Image: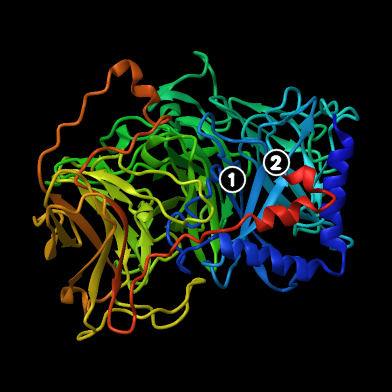
């Protein structure tokens, strides 16, 4: 292991943290982050810059170590950096002040490990805070999920949530872990604070539990003295949550029993795949995991969904709660007869977190199904629970959240009786009252696509844009939702914004590049892509693009007075009309490689962005800056340059 370089890098990080110049250096870091993140200052979805690919996100809220009394929302995850594989050699962190969820800051690399000439690949991590009862000192434990041989059970700790983190159970040669280390795939740790003075753990202040597993669920109580080994005198709970190979098809060995389920629970309703995570909500515990879903609401089986179970203790027993979010974006089909999907599938991972009194589910999406460029997503949820114990029939229910619905519940239902009760996949993310209309939004924030291969990906840190490419005749691109009713005052960590008032002269702005197939039209639909009883959509404008514009970047505007004076939030759908395009049929033998080796599909146009404008409030697409090589030249003069260049 190259200890010298690793130690130099860690010493530098420590110097930055502890030196009196830390705050000015932090300001420089923030300036650089601001330069890289050329984006709207709103909390849209994905909520991190479009060039950032941080899947497997685990959300937490901790006190800001640099501003006591202030709190920040933190997200840590693995890091998709290449086209050849998902995840890479680092655990990365972003954070935002809870009072402004649009100001996400890149905290950089949280942890990486170099041994025997190579960096360990890091999968889905977790991070928890514990507090010493006697001193009040906070310690943060990171479970990085290294995939290095013999190092999966690595555990690290720090005095700060943003590090630097040092391993506490890695052997001296850096190649393995200490005896007793047992944590495995997709670790999740739950800290239960002890407030009862009669509790034998009151002096310690907490109990710790760990959950892990891939297609096989395991849990146990951790020894608080190590935080990486099982607590003496406790037992390992194997086959903790029933695992499935498809929805309803239990994959655990025949005859497996499940002591962690309530009597009468059907093991086929849980469908565990991976991605364990646990939270306490009210008087109940909620177990979140990636689980096969779909047939329970009339769709095909996918593990691109999160499910949940609830119980009275961190180790159960559990009752199945159902689907928490399906990242495919479930909605009714055109006539409302069945449910359908509007986004591609791959996998997903995440959890629940309460911020400013609002619960959210965090998950990730794969553009066009490409699993090597996954993006962090979020959606509000409504959680209802009663005061009864689950053992006595107590219930907990999680649904999609709509602040404007009479009961604040969002669901998707169809005439065939199927109902999807999970979170809604939208363009708004934290912006639960809708996106402020008078701004530019990249096409990458689209949440409804009738062709799931249109969404491109982006790795250019200077360009916060993603195209929806190759839109064809009849194709639909949708954005949910725009807050035409405005937001009068700041709420839930969101800034107040102006709505569209009568007489404002509001225009829709589209930024696109026509293809080679002649003239076309774009029908602008409000509330739904179809003007029928199911969707209740209505056409509010038509954008006509003449022939002869092939390859030109166009900024098109059209008046949309229909959005002025609206209350609440509303969706906008773009429906294309033009020549029919015959695309070449892909050989089925190569279909699996299509997402890995993407081609921009041929279509009527590529959509770059959308927004609204009015006199005095133009909608402008950010210009990608031309950057000289000066920053690299400066970095090359630094003594640690060979570590970072």
Q: Residue at x 87, y 69 (%)?
A: 20
- Image coordinates of residue 63 in percent, x first then y, are 71, 65
CA gap between label 1 and label 2 equals 10 Å
- Image coordinates of residue 583 in percent, x first then y, are 19, 31
Would you place residue 480 above or below residue 476 in this image? below
Give the farthest residue toward the top. 254
Q: Residues within 10 Å of mark 2 (few under 14, many from 20)?
A: many
- Image coordinates of residue 185 in percent, x first then y, are 63, 30
Would you place residue 430 above or below residue 266 in this image? below
Q: Does the CB distance between marks 1 and 2 fall below 8 Å?
A: yes
In-front residue for pair 101/351: 101
Q: Quadrant of the N terminus?
A: top right
Q: Residue at x 24, y 84 (%)?
A: 504
Q: Secondary structure at mark 2?
A: strand
- Find disc 1 in the rendering and name its residue: 278
In-front residue for pair 91/355: 91
Q: Is residue 19 left or right of residue 129?
A: right
Q: Quadrant of the C terminus?
A: top right
Q: Which mark is residue 209?
A: 2
Q: Secondary structure at mark 1?
A: strand
Q: Residue at x 78, y 43 (%)?
A: 643
Q: Quadrant of residue 29?
A: bottom right
Query: Can residue 137 be seen from the camera position used here?
Result: no
Colour treatment of the image: rainbow
Would you place residue 483 above or below residue 184 in this image? below
In-front residue for pair 203/468: 468
Query: Can residue 83 be seen from the camera position used here?
Result: yes
Q: Earlier in the sequence, mark 1 or mark 2?
A: 2
């Amino acid at each position: 292991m190259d200890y010298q370089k690793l130690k130099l890098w860690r010493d530098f990080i420590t110097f930055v943290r502890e030196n009196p110049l830390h705050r000015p250096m932090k300001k420089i870091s923030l300036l650089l982050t601001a330069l890289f993140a050329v984006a709207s200052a709103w909390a849209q979805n994905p909520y991190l810059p479009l060039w950032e690919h941080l899947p497997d996100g685990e959300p937490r809220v901790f006190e800001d170590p640099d501003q006591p009394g202030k709190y920040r929302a933190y997200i840590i995850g693995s890091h998709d950096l290449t086209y050849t594989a998902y995840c890479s050699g680092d655990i990365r962190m972003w954070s935002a002040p809870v009072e402004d969820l649009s100001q996400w800051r890149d905290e950089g690399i949280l942890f990486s490990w170099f041994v025997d000439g190579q960096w360990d690949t890091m999968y889905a991590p977790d991070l928890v805070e514990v507090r010493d009862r006697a001193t009040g000192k906070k310690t943060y434990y990171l479970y990085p999920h290294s995939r290095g041989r013999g190092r999966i059970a690595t555990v690290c700790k720090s005095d700060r949530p943003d590090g630097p983190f040092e391993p506490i159970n890695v052997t001296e040669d850096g190649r393995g872990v200490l005896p007793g280390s047992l944590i495995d795939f997709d670790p999740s740790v739950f800290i239960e604070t002890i407030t009862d003075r009669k509790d034998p753990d009151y002096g310690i202040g907490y109990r710790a539990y760990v959950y892990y597993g891939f297609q096989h669920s395991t849990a146990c109580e951790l020894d608080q003295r190590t935080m990486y080994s099982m607590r003496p005198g406790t037992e390992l709970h194997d086959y903790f949550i029933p695992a499935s190979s498809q929805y309803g098809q239990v994959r655990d060995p025949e005859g497996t029993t499940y002591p962690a389920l309530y009597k009468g629970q059907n093991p086929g309703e849980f469908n565990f795949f991976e991605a364990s995570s646990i939270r306490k909500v009210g008087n109940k515990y909620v177990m979140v995991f990636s689980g096969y879903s779909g047939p329970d609401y009339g769709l095909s089986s996918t593990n691109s969904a999160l499910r949940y179970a609830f119980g009275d203790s961190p180790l159960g027993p559990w009752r199945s709660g159902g689907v928490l979010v399906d990242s495919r974006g479930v909605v009714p089909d055109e006539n409302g007869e069945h449910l359908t999907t509007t986004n591609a599938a791959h996998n997903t991972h995440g959890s629940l977190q309460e911020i400013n009194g609002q619960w959210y589910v965090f998950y990730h999406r794969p553009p066009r199904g490409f699993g090597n460029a996954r993006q962090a997503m979020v959606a509000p949820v409504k959680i209802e629970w009663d005061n009864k114990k689950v053992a006595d029939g107590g219930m907990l229910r999680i649904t999609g959240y709509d602040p404007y619905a009479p009961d604040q519940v969002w669901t998707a239902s169809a005439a065939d009786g199927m109902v999807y009760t999970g979170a809604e996949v939208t363009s708004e993310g934290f912006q639960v009252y809708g996106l402020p209309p008078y701004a530019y939004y990249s096409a990458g924030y689209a949440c409804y696509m009738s062709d799931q291969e249109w969404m491109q990906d982006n790795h250019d840190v200077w360009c916060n844009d993603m195209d929806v490419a190759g839109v064809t005749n009849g194709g639909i691109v949708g954005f949910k939702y725009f807050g035409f009713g405005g937001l009068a005052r700041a709420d839930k960590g969101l800034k107040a914004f102006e709505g569209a008032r009568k007489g404002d002269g509001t225009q829709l702005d589209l930024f696109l590049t026509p293809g080679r197939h002649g003239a076309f039209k774009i029908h602008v639909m409000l509330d739904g892509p179809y003007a029928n009883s199911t969707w209740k959509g209505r056409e509010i404008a038509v954008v006509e693009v003449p022939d002869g514009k092939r390859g030109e970047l166009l900024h098109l505007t059209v008046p949309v007075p229909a959005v002025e004076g609206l209350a609440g939030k509303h969706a906008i759908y773009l429906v294309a009309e033009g020549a029919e395009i015959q695309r070449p049929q892909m050989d089925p033998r190569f279909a699996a490689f299509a997402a890995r080796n993407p081609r921009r599909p041929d279509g009527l146009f590529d959509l770059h962005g959308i927004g609204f404008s009015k006199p005095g409030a133009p909608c402008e697409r950010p210009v990608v800056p031309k950057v000289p090589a000066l920053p690299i030249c400066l970095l090359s003069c630094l003594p640690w340059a060979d570590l970072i260049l």
